[in-house]
């Protein structure tokens, strides 16, 4: 029987997944503009994991990290509600930065970090 992870373990796992995702994106010539951005007093709650520039596109990247796919792929954790929140957060980020982004894309990076073996990164573009 598998025991639930302690909150600190989940936080560390998520941070490791975000670090791997950031390195992955940089290795593909994307520029990281922001990480773990939270709006302050803008009427929307939540966090943008990564905001990157890919050529002339601004990309909002949601990173989901798991130790295994025993309970489903990390991508399956992205719900319609989560996507609505990400859109609201993206608009708040653009307003906060006073940026007009003619091309905006939402990507998901699923990171699986097994207890033994190498991490697996799956990049879904334009979800």
Image: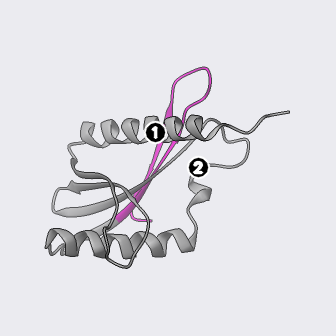
Q: Where is residue 79 drawn, in percent x and y?
A: 58, 67
Q: Which range of residues does the magenta coloring cover? A: 106-127
Pointer 2 local density, CA inside 10 Å: few below 14, some 14–19, many at least 20? many
The kind of secondary structure element at disc 1 is helix
Residue at image location 73% in from the left, 47% down from the top:
71
Pointer 1 local density, CA inside 10 Å: few below 14, some 14–19, many at least 20? many
* Residue farthest to the top, as pictured: 116
Q: Quadrant of the N terminus?
A: top right
User: Magenta span has 60?
Assistant: no
Q: Where is residue 42 drawn, in percent x and y?
A: 32, 76
* Residue farthest to the bottom, as pictured: 43
Q: Where is residue 102 drawn, in percent x and y?
A: 18, 75
Sequence order check: which comes first, mark 2 or mark 1? Answer: 1
User: Magenta span has 120?
Assistant: yes
Vertical position of residue 72 compared to residue 20: above or below: below
The kind of secondary structure element at disc 2 is helix
Q: Nearer the viewer, residue 25 or 62?
A: 62
Q: Quadrant of residue 98?
A: bottom left
Q: Where is residue 29 drawn, in percent x and y?
A: 20, 43
Disc ID at residue 17: 1
Disc ID at residue 74: 2
Vertical position of residue 29 compared to residue 99: above or below: above
The answer to whether mark 2 and mark 1 are in CB contact below 8 A is no
């Amino acid at each position: 029987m598998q025991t639930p992870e302690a909150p600190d373990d989940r936080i560390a796992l998520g941070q490791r997944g975000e670090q791997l995702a950031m390195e992955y994106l940089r290795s593909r010539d994307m520029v990281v503009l922001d990480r773990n951005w939270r709006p302050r007093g803008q009427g929307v709650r939540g966090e943008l994991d990564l905001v990157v520039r890919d050529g002339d596109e601004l990309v909002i990247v949601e990173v989901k990290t798991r130790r295994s796919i025993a309970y489903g792929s990390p991508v399956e954790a992205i719900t319609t509600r989560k996507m609505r929140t990400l859109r609201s957060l993206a608009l708040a980020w653009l307003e906060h930065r006073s940026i007009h982004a003619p091309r905006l894309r939402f990507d998901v990076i699923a990171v699986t970090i097994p207890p033994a073996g190498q991490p697996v990164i799956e990049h879904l573009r334009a979800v």
